[in-house]
Image (cartoon, rainbow, N blue to C red):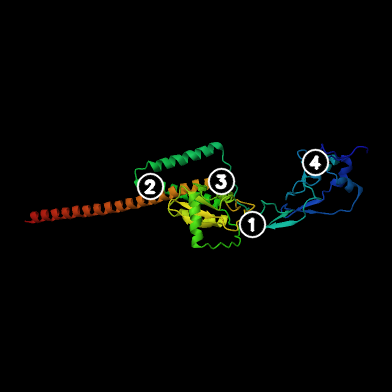
Amino acid sequence: GGRSAFTARSPWRPSSPGSLAAGLCNPPLLYALHGSLPLLLLMPPSPSCILGLIYRLPPNSDPWMRFHGANPPRPCPLFRPSPGVDGCARAARRWWFLSPVRHGSTAVTLNTDGGFARFSVGDPGPNQNGGQNQPPAKKKMSKKSKVNQLKWYRLKAKKKMKSPNPEVRIRYKLGKAKRKEEWLIEKLRKYEAPRAPELVHDPEILTEEEKFYLKRTGEKKKNYVPVGRRGVFGGVVLNMHLHWKKHETMQVVCKPCRPGQVYEYAEELARLSKGTVIDIKPNNTIIFYRGKNYVQPKVMSPPDTLSKQKALEKYRYEQSLEHTSKFVEQLEQELEDYQKHVALFKKREGAISEQISNEDSAVDDLTTNSDTD
């Protein structure tokens, strides 16, 4: 005819249902192995069979996608019988196409899970292996269920905090503090900058006279670089190189600084700036010398150091970890003292009860002796 039998927007219908009757009266499909493995029988070609290859698509599917085989192959039969047979016209509509044959996979898969043999056509999907290598799917919680769960946790914590037993209260605080300590340690691991491979650095050898002269010079000059709560980061090394552009020596003032931490700062700054430590003062001040053959580097801030913002975050986590560790030690000592107190109280109570029982037995003996007399 002049019109095409297939359009992209309407289901694919046979151009002449009567011409399909001869080709579709004998269905070319048998069901074997309980309907799992379709067996297609080949027939000698004939005009009626060629016309019979044109089938009708189900109305609830996209004909263009099914015609091009976009949907995955399914283990169900390729043809489904239509209820009711009335004449050749209805026999022509008895079977319709469900899954593409030409573009689908012809692999036959045998699955023996559960002690039963099951055959399927096509590549096994991600959900057809029994879900052995897949993590369990997380159940999506509604907002109301999340709120209820948080309320339950708060109520449980409130009961422990108001428990009449002191050991329950101490153990609850101790467990919470230990969880926070682990969380802080995990956070601080992210701020451990990997050290770059160190270049060969030959420090200059200074005589005692040179050291004394450089020390006096560094004490007289007022140029300094502060090292505050952020500690050593890229900006400190950058300021040192900017000072060394005009001066041979400079001071590094460390405030606040724990006892002994100034030596760690001196070692770290000497490694990063390639300078020489001349003297460390009791007031946590370090005097650095740039060197005789000093050349200002192109990148004055080392790449293996933290930024100013990251250094502040690291300091806050370290401070919180320090206080949490002290609190954990305090709670552990408190729990140990309470357990000792309970053991001592039970021991005294046992001794008192034993003494009372002995006195009662002595009184009973006296009464029995008096009765016999």
Which quadrant is home to the N terminus? top right
Mark 1, mark 4: which one is toward the viewer?
4
Percent x, y for residue 140? 58, 42
Q: Earlier in the sequence, mark 2 or mark 1?
A: 1
Which is more foreground, mark 2 or mark 4?
2
Q: Amino acid at mark 4?
A: Pro
Q: Nearer the viewer, mark 3 or mark 2?
A: 3
Among numbered discs 2 and 4, the one appearing first in the sequence: 4
Callouts 3 and 2 close, C-beta under 8 Å = no
Q: Earlier in the sequence, mark 3 or mark 1?
A: 1
- Mark 1, residue position: 113
Marked residue nearer the N-terminal end (3 or 2): 2
User: In the image, residue 195 lies at what x, y percent?
Assistant: 58, 57
Of badges 4 and 3, nearer the viewer stands 3
Residue that carries the numbered disc 3 in the rendered image: 308
Q: What amino acid is found at the position of numbered circle 2 in the picture?
A: Ile
Q: Amino acid at mark 1?
A: Asp
**Of the two numbered discs 3 and 1 in the rendering, the one whose residue sits closer to the viewer:** 3
3D distance between C-alphas at marks 2 and 4:
69 Å
Q: Residue furthest right?
A: 1
The numbered mark, 1 or 4, whose residue comes first in the sequence reads 4
The amino acid at mark 3 is Lys
Q: Which mark is residue 63?
A: 4
Between 257 and 34, the one lying in front of the other is: 257
Where disc 3 sits, the SS reads helix
Check the image and report above or below for 115 versus 171: below
Residue count near mark 3 (Cα–Cα under 10 Å), binned few <14, some 14–19, many ≥20? some
> Could you tell me which residue is drawn at 36 percent across and 52 percent down?
333
The correct choice, above or below, for 167 with respect to 2 in the image is: below
Question: What is the spatial separation of the Cα atoms under label 3 and label 1, in whole angstroms?
Answer: 59 Å
